[in-house]
Image (cartoon, helix red, strand yellow):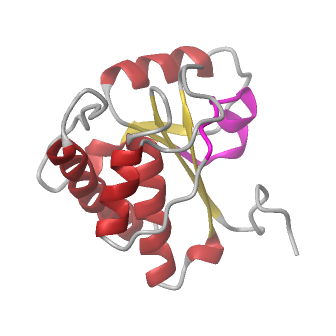
Amino acid sequence: MHQNNMAAPGSKSVLFVCLGNICRSPIAEAVFRKMATDDGVADKWRIDSAATSTYEIGNPPDHRGQACMRKHDVPMRHVARQVTKEDFMSYEFILCMDESNLSDLNRKAKSVTNYRAKIELLGSYDPQKQLIIKDPYYGSDEDFEKVYEQCVRCCKAFLEKNS
């Protein structure tokens, strides 16, 4: 029995990242985990999410995001944390939501010698070519719904490419 944060040998790993780790990245994490579970491959993946900022550390996901996930029957349990240097070494993929996350992550990665993570926009997998997943924090329930739909499309394509 390996610890939760250590995946089995030969396994794959993905870390979803946004600014605060309470809206977009926990939604992406939950969506991807449900997909991997439904496909019977969840045990092959180490899946988590994190923030580029310190704003929300220790907080649960935004209640609007939680309501959106409940509506779609997607289980979501997460406590916000910040990306660590170790993440750049231990994750195969770090998928983020917008250009600002991307530049923050690339800057942080430079301080990690020989980091192995592939840092990409989650939206780069979107068949509908919506590259940026906009922060719904100051938006409406519809904005959370849009994030959910984008995450579903992107996670599906990402999982297919990496299964």
Picture coordinates of residue 9 (x, y %)? 77, 68
The image shows residue 90 at horizontal and vertical percentages of: 72, 44
Q: Position of residue 75 (x, y in %)?
A: 48, 68
Residue at 56% from the left image edge and 43% from the top image edge: 60
Image coordinates for residue 35, horizontal then vertical, percent: 42, 73
Which residue is depicted at the point 31% across and 31% down? 137
* 48 left or right, relative to 135: right
**In-front residue for pair 99/70:** 70
Q: Is residue 144 visible?
A: yes
**Towards the viewer: 27 or 44:** 27
Q: Quadrant of residue 139?
A: top left
Residue 163 seen by the camera:
no
The reply, left or right, for residue 73 in relation to residue 107 is left
Farthest residue, direction right? 1
Image position of 103 with respect to 114: above or below:
above
Return the residue nearer the eye: 45 or 32.
32
Q: Is residue 82 magenta?
A: yes
Is residue 40 shown in magenta?
no
Rendering quarter of residue 112: top right
Relative vertical location of residue 44 with respect to residue 152 in this rendering, above or below: below
Q: Residue at x 54, y 14 (%)?
A: 107
| Residue at far left of view | 128
- The answer to whether 90 is drawn above or below residue 153 in the figure is above
Viewport quadrant of the N terminus? bottom right
Q: Which residues are magenta?
A: 79-93
Task: Report the number of numbered marks.
Answer: 0
The residue drawn where x is 21% and y is 52% is 145
